[in-house]
Every structure is written in C-alpha cells, then in structure tokens.
Amino acid sequence: MARYRFHPLTPARWEDFERLFGARGACGGCWCMWFRFSNAEFERRKGAGNKRAMKALVRKGAAPGILAYWGGEPVGWCAVAPRAEYTRLERSRILKPVDDQPVWSVVCFFIHREHRARGLTVALLREAARYVKQRGGTILEGYPVDPKQQMPPAFAYHGLAAAFREAGFEECARRSPTRPIMRYYVGRHRP
C-alpha cells in the first residue's frame, strides 16, 4: 500500500478521473451519480449528462471522493460525501438512517481491474476516514454487500463488508441479509 497515493477529486484532477472512468463512465454511464439522483433523473442523464453533473460538482469545489494513484496513474476511486448529498439513500427502506447523527457516507468504489484484490478498497476507506476527519466529520458510514457466495467485481461497487471490517468499520444495522450498514467512528480510531 505504501506505493499508492491518494488525493481528493478537485478540478485539477478531473482529467485523471475521466481517464480512470473511461468513455463509458465506469459502469454504463454512471459517472458515480447513481446515489445522487432518482431513477428517472439518473436514466435521463445517463452518460454525458451524468458526466456533466459530476464535473459541475467538482467545479463547485465539492471534492466528492478520493482518487488512488499508482505510479502517477489513477487506479481507484471512492465516493465520499455527507449523507444528505445522496438522495437515493433517503428513499431506501434498507439503507434508511440508523439514527439522527450527522454522518458522511461512502457509497461507491471503482478499482481498475489490474488493481483489484490488492487491498486498495481498504486503503481507500482509510483515506476516506482521514478526509472526513479533516472536514470535521465524526461518523463515516458505508453500505457494502455481504455476499453469500463469490460475486463478480462489477457488482461489488458498494464495497464488500469484509473490506469495511478490515478498515475498522463496525456493523450498526442490517435490514437485509446481504446489506449491512457499517460505521467508522472517526474519534475512536486513527485512520
């Protein structure tokens, strides 16, 4: 992990984000906007519209996630922001709020295929905790999958519960057999 470098997504790093996500926007034109829009709005914007929406967020200074680099090349992504920015979470029965505590949320990962299964998700989670701490947050929440069997990496974009546990997250709710809500208490741990 010592050879990976991490940076928030800022306007100066937009081209790196584009390069990592590729022409298809990582996964079918998502551009990491799925959690920010309703189904109808997401489908209407799919592709170029989602890309423009993400670029507008970045231009406003939102820094909506962390990029991982290997040898100067972008190889990983972790979306992290205050939970309120992810409107889809508010409409989810399974991922509805656990309590009224203000939390930041990790909702998505994209790892270049050559860097999968190397622990990069765990490293990105630790960087996300540092990022949240720097911004005054105290709770970081994630919504990984806890599969009963092996699953293709393309379907693990929420992250796997095992990676969250390894990064120091604790399960705080489970309303579905395969979808725990996990929290990292920033003040309790050293990211």
Image: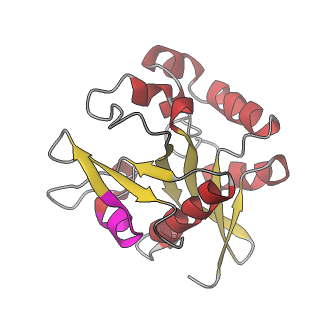
Is residue 22 visible from the viewing direction of this image? no
Q: Residue at x 53, y 73 (%)?
A: 190
Q: Residue at x 68, y 28 (%)?
A: 53
User: Can you give x and y, in whole percent of width and height, for residue 105 in the image?
Assistant: 49, 45
Reply above or below: 164 against 94.
below
**Nearer to us in this view, 175 or 20:** 175
Question: Split into 4 quadrants, where in the image is the N terminus?
Answer: bottom right
| Magenta stretch contains residue 88 | no
Reply above or below: 28 against 110.
above
**Nearer to us in this view, 41 or 173:** 173
Reply above or below: 123 against 179.
below
Instruction: Quadrant for residue 165, please give it.
Output: bottom left
Instruction: Quadrant for residue 66, please give it.
Output: bottom right
Q: Residue at x 34, y 53 (%)?
A: 182
Reply above or below: 107 against 71.
above
Q: Residue furthest bottom?
A: 2
Q: Residue at x 60, y 54 (%)?
A: 132
**Nearer to us in this view, 60 or 133:** 133
Is residue 132 visible from the viewing direction of this image? yes
User: Can you give x and y, in whole percent of width and height, for residue 61 in the image?
Assistant: 79, 40
User: Can you give x and y, in whole percent of width and height, for residue 50 in the image?
Assistant: 62, 29
Question: Split into 4 quadrants, where in the image is the C terminus?
Answer: bottom right
Q: Is residue 167 left or right of residue 29?
A: left
Give, as a single range, the part of the protein colored magenta: 162-170
| Magenta stretch contains residue 163 | yes
**Across the whole image, how many numbered discs are drawn on residues?**
0
Instruction: Quadrant for residue 170, please give it.
Output: bottom left
